[in-house]
Amino acid sequence: MNKLTLILTIILFSFSLCAVENHSTEISYNDVAVMIRFSEPKIFKINDSIYIDIEIKNKSNKPSAVLIADDKRYTFDFELVSLQNKPVGYNKDYSNFFNRVQPIFNSMIRLNKDEGFTYRVLLNDYYDIDTSGQYYIRAVFHPALKLSENNVNVMKSNYLTINVRPESINDRYIVEQKEAEMERMLFAEKKAPDEVIEYMLNARMKSEWEKYFLYIDVSKMILTNSKFKDKYRKADSERQSKIIEEYKEYLKQNTIDEMSYIPILFNIVKTEYSTGEAKVEAILKFKQYDFIEDKYYTYFLNKKDDKWFVTSYTVLNIGAR
């Protein structure tokens, strides 16, 4: 690079930084929410293009303003970890992108109450996912642009699960892909104990079983069931996995002993929790032939990795009408 070219490049970069600094006095984003979803939910193969829709929405009663760069790599970033919670490194193109001097063209986007925008981003611009397995990802939004690797003014989205299979897949993977396309990938998020129970019960009422089991520690709950606990304790690890699947199928039943176990309504009446344990009490209503039966459920939850999971419950019949 000759001297004249270097000077022009520095001038362009300085001009772009000045533009960002001038905007920054107007930026307001404290109540902006960030949500992500797959553009096409499915199980991906190695080297597939993975597009992610990122929604930016103003949740406050006041107008908000953020900067959106023409090149979305200055606005959106991602955190990608493996199933073992090991961070995945950026690809070479993305690393080189931030190591070169260039102008940053951007626009200020103003958001009124409940107003939002959705942007589609190609994950392959950030990562080379060339190993099959399960990954967890969330977006990082830079409302005043990403000008360095140590930017602290960021907002983070929900998590998504990415399942990546080898390029040559067999019939078992094809079945899994069809199931995944029917329902978006799920990942347990931080919720209060009562929110966990509400999420779980709503899923049960709709027979959305992936969601229903998301916040249940099945390996602990099975130990409270007299029908399964003894054979589970005596089994080896491989057999225990099969018994857990049998137990989950048991829990999915619409009726047990000819009595309905799918509630038609519920009401959470009390929540108590300490550092690592919680208790949520709720009244559930069940349709039984020609009458409505009320049951008082007490759910017990334990905290694991800063998230609440149901480990057991008790039931008390309180009447019918």
Image (cartoon, rainbow, N blue to C red):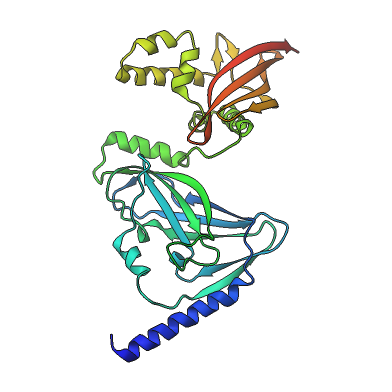
Where residue 154 appears, as percent x and y from the top left, is 53, 58
157 with respect to 83 (left or right):
right
Task: Name the residue located 41 percent from the left edge and 36 percent from the top edge.
Answer: 179
Which residue is outermost to the left? 168
Where residue 168 appears, as percent x and y from the top left, is 23, 43
Which residue is outermost to the bottom? 4
Task: Name the residue located 60 percent from the left edge and 31 percent from the top edge.
Answer: 193
* Number of marks in picture: 0
The image quadrant of residue 83 is top left
**Nearer the observer, 109 or 192:** 192
The image quadrant of residue 281 is top right
Where residue 90 appears, as percent x and y from the top left, is 34, 57
Task: For the C terminus, give its image quadrant.
Answer: top right
Q: Is residue 91 visible?
A: yes
**Nearer the observer, 141 or 291:** 141
Which residue is outermost to the front? 275
Q: In this view, does 23 lie above or below 42?
A: below
Where residue 147 appears, as percent x and y from the top left, is 46, 68
Q: In this view, does 131 lie above or below 20?
A: above
Task: Name the residue located 26 percent from the left edge and 37 percent from the top edge.
Answer: 170
The image quadrant of residue 1 is bottom left
302 with respect to 84 (left or right):
right
119 with respect to 59 (left or right):
left
**Nearer the observer, 80 or 54:** 80
Q: Is residue 226 above or below residue 106?
A: above
Q: Is residue 254 above or below residue 46?
A: above
